[in-house]
Image (tube, helix red, strand yellow):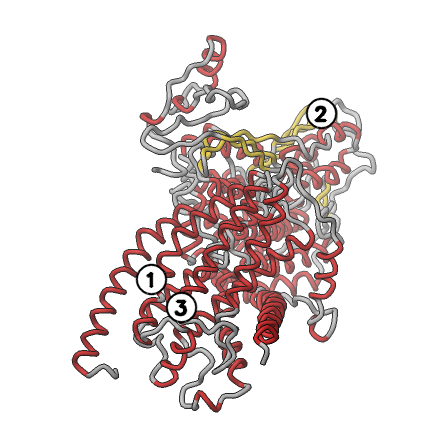
């Protein structure tokens, strides 16, 4: 096949997956939170309110796209793109099936995390360019949170990499299919990864960057129309990326235990998506019920608890893994 | 760093007021234990309103350029129309000044042009969350002036409805306290419970917010069977529901992190700044108008006054949460022991009261509400004065703001339960 055509098709695939997962997570969030809060949620448009997003998007598209006075217009327009594009790109590295991965690179884990690290840059640009004090406070908080939580996040993905002996996400999945899910030996890493994932996606209890009761809407206070739409969509897409990454690293990715990974066929992406949605459901229940961390307590949690703990855990894990491999042979 | 607590003496710059202000402050602060609070010397280049209390830069900490942050009146968590101007150093508040008056409707002046039985309509609009209690204050003042004997059944109905309204108001406050700290669920759980009490009020008064129920010498409606059934049904499940609320909000470690040790108010300060209600009781002062200066039928009920000793946000919230349990006890006693009889005293159609003055004092949901009426013998009061408990809490919030983190300030200000209808009147 023509290589350009192939690339174009993969791009379409990634964009479609992102849009669909973003839209369905928004609907899911509304329904799950409503159920958790003893409310009904959207129920008017379409069966069970499933078309609610259509007027939402029409509203976002037709609203006035306004720049605040004295804002840095170039940066203000650029910021949603800086937030949106890395999220979109991160989708390319997630394996949805044996051959269904847009970019099957050997550094898959690092690439996803590297692209996600760009997101706080966009958030900071948005808050800085908005010429709004609430937005600026949110932006500064976002940078503080990013440097706090990137380190334990990066450290917590090391045990699966050690177990699989590869940074290629497809190989990590296959290693789990041939053996066991990596959550079993590396449970603390999985827990820390999920905590940091909530931080990375600005979810409660770590949503200090847009803490509505304090900062109105945080870094996105001044954004309206589709620029806000992009920030909004990127947030939910980020949810899916982090959940899918957690599934890929710790919960067997697109495989199921006891089933030959090469006979999964079309069910492979389904399995990944359902597993991811279970993780997202977990995030949503936390989001719906818990109070928000204060920004200094969150920094204390990151620097004083998570970073020392993950450092020691990675060391212990590495020594233990090498010991097991030496005692029982390299196959273990 | 003792966040939310008063800074130690070492952190404070000395008081440098001009001479007149010095003597004024000495008069004002006589008996006040910590005059080192006042430090009206803002840094150069920033315009801070005079006489606000501010803390000095901590020499041991990194401090950045200060900036002013205007919070409200459109801010989502100012619970009405509060505007606070904060002088901030990063996330830390150096000084804060509250501005009131955004919701001023001249209720006290309007009262001079209303007959006595019309006052209930006005004061409903003042404290729009717990209308029954403030209506009672207006009615009590009028009854004292006109020397009206209220029939016992009407007194018991007033107590019953006041407690129903108190619970509705407390739920309306504790839920949003969860929202202020970021917890969304508890707000909706409590709204669901509040709905039942609002239904009872609607059944009895025909209104869901502005009840206009308690009039001089009478109440407007008798206890209906449906209202009694609704209340008895809730009494069966109420304690269990409250355990659920307790578990989902107060047992949450995140909520405790956000509220324990935040906004600590000492008993001395609480007394000196005129705090009443839960603010006073959470600081350890055991005072409740219902028990200590009983009005209506409150001397006939068996209930406890809830106190706490810490004086922080957590204590203020839990203190009130326990008050809901006591209110349920009073409601149960009301339903069981309601005396039979008329709900109206014999009164002339146009009430003309003798010359004089009187003050009706009640424990509203937010604290001690007093309505002082001055009469010249006509059918309208010459002057009405409404003592809003949360106006005094606002003064306390101002002294607690310096040295708080911004996120704590939102929770701290929420913990006083401001109702701007009554602050601005």
In x, y percent, where is residue B73? 64, 37
In the rendered structure, which disc, 1 or 3, sits on the residue that comes first in sequence? 3
Name which quarter of the figure residue B334 lies in: bottom right
Chain ID at mark 1? A
In x, y percent, where is residue B229? 65, 65
Q: Can you say whether A240 is above or below A257 in the image?
A: above
The residue positioned farthest toward the top in the image shown: B19
In terms of secondary structure, where does tag 2 sit? strand
Instruction: Please identify the quadrant where the N terminus of chain B is shown.
Output: top left
Q: Which residue is mark 3?
A: A107
Left or right: B105, with B392 as reference point:
right
Q: Which residue is mark 2?
A: B383
Instruction: Please identify the quadrant where the C terminus of chain B is shown.
Output: top right
Can marks 1 and 3 be said to lie on one chain? Answer: yes
In x, y percent, where is residue B147? 69, 33
In x, y percent, where is residue B130? 64, 45
Disc 2 residue crowd, few under 14, some 14–19, many 20+, Cα 10 Å: some
């Amino acid at each position: 096949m023509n290589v350009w055509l192939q690339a174009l098709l993969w791009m379409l695939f990634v964009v479609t997956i992102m849009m669909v997962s973003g839209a369905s997570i928004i609907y899911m969030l509304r329904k799950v939170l409503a159920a958790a809060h003893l409310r009904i949620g959207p129920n008017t448009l379409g069966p069970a309110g499933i078309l609610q997003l259509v007027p939402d998007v029409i509203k976002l598209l037709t609203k006035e796209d306004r720049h605040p006075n004295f804002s840095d217009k170039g940066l203000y327009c650029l910021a949603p793109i800086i937030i949106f594009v890395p999220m979109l790109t991160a989708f390319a590295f997630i394996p949805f099936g044996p051959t269904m991965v847009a970019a099957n690179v050997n550094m898959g884990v690092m690439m996803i995390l590297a692209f996600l690290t760009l997101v706080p840059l966009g958030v900071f640009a948005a808050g800085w360019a908005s010429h709004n004090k609430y937005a600026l406070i949110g932006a500064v908080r976002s940078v503080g949170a990013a440097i706090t939580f990137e380190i334990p996040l990066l450290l917590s993905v090391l045990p699966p990499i050690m177990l699989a002996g590869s940074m290629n996400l497809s190989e990590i999945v296959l290693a789990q299919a041939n053996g066991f899910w990596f959550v079993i030996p590396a449970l603390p890493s999985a827990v820390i990864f999920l905590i940091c994932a909530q931080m990375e996606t600005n979810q409660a209890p770590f949503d200090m960057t847009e803490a509505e009761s304090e900062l109105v809407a945080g870094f996105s206070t001044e954004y309206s129309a589709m620029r806000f739409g992009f920030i909004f969509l990127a947030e939910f897409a980020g949810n899916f990326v982090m959940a899918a990454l957690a599934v890929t690293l710790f919960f067997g990715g697109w495989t199921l235990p006891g089933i030959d990974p090469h006979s999964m066929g079309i069910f492979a992406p389904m399995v990944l998506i359902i597993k991811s949605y279970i993780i997202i459901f977990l995030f949503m229940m936390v989001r719906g019920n818990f109070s928000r961390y204060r920004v200094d307590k969150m920094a204390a949690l990151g620097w004083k608890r998570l970073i020392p703990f993950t450092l020691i855990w990675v060391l212990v894990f590495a020594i233990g893994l090498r010991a097991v491999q030496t005692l029982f042979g390299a196959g273990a | 760093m003792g966040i939310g607590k008063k800074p130690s003496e070492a952190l404070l710059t000395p008081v440098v007021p001009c001479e007149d202000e010095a003597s004024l402050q000495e008069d004002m602060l006589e008996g006040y234990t910590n005059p080192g609070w006042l430090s009206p010397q803002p840094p150069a280049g920033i315009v801070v309103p005079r006489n606000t209390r501010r803390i000095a830069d901590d020499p041991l900490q990194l401090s950045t350029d200060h900036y002013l942050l205007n919070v409200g009146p459109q801010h989502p968590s100012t619970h009405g129309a509060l505007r606070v101007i904060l002088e901030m150093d990063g996330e830390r508040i150096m000084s804060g000044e509250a501005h009131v008056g955004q919701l001023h409707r001249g209720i006290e002046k309007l009262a001079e042009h209303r007959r006595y039985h019309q006052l209930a309509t006005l004061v409903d609009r003042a404290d729009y969350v717990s209308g029954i209690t403030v209506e009672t204050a207006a009615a009590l003042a009028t009854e004292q002036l006109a020397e009206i004997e209220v029939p016992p059944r009407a007194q018991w109905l007033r107590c019953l409805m006041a407690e129903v309204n108190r619970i509705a108001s407390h739920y309306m406050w504790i839920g949003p306290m969860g929202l202020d700290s970021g917890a969304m669920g508890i707000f909706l759980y409590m709204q669901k419970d509040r709905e039942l009490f609002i239904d009872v009020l609607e059944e009895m008064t025909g209104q869901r917010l502005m009840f206009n129920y308690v009039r001089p010498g009478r109440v407007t409606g008798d206890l209906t069977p449906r209202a009694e059934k609704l209340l008895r049904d809730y009494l069966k499940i109420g304690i269990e529901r409250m355990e659920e609320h307790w578990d989902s909000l107060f047992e949450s470690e995140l909520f405790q992190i956000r509220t324990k040790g935040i906004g600590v108010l000492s008993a001395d300060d609480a007394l000196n700044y005129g705090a009443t209600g839960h603010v006073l009781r959470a600081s350890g002062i055991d005072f409740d108008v219902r028990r200590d200066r009983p009005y209506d039928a409150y001397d006939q009920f068996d209930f406890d006054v809830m106190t706490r000793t810490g004086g922080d946000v957590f204590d203020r919230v839990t203190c009130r949460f326990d008050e809901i349990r006591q209110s349920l006890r009073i409601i149960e006693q009301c339903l069981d022991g309601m005396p039979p009889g008329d709900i109206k005293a014999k009164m002339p159609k146009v009430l003309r009261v003798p010359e004089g003055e009187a003050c009706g004092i009640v424990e509203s949901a937010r604290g001690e509400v007093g309505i002082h009426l001055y009469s010249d013998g006509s059918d309208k009061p010459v002057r009405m004065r409404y003592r809003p408990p949360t106006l005094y809490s606002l003064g306390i919030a101002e002294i607690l703001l310096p040295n708080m983190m911004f996120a704590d300030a939102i929770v701290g200000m929420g913990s006083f339960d401001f109702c701007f209808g009554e602050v601005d009147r």
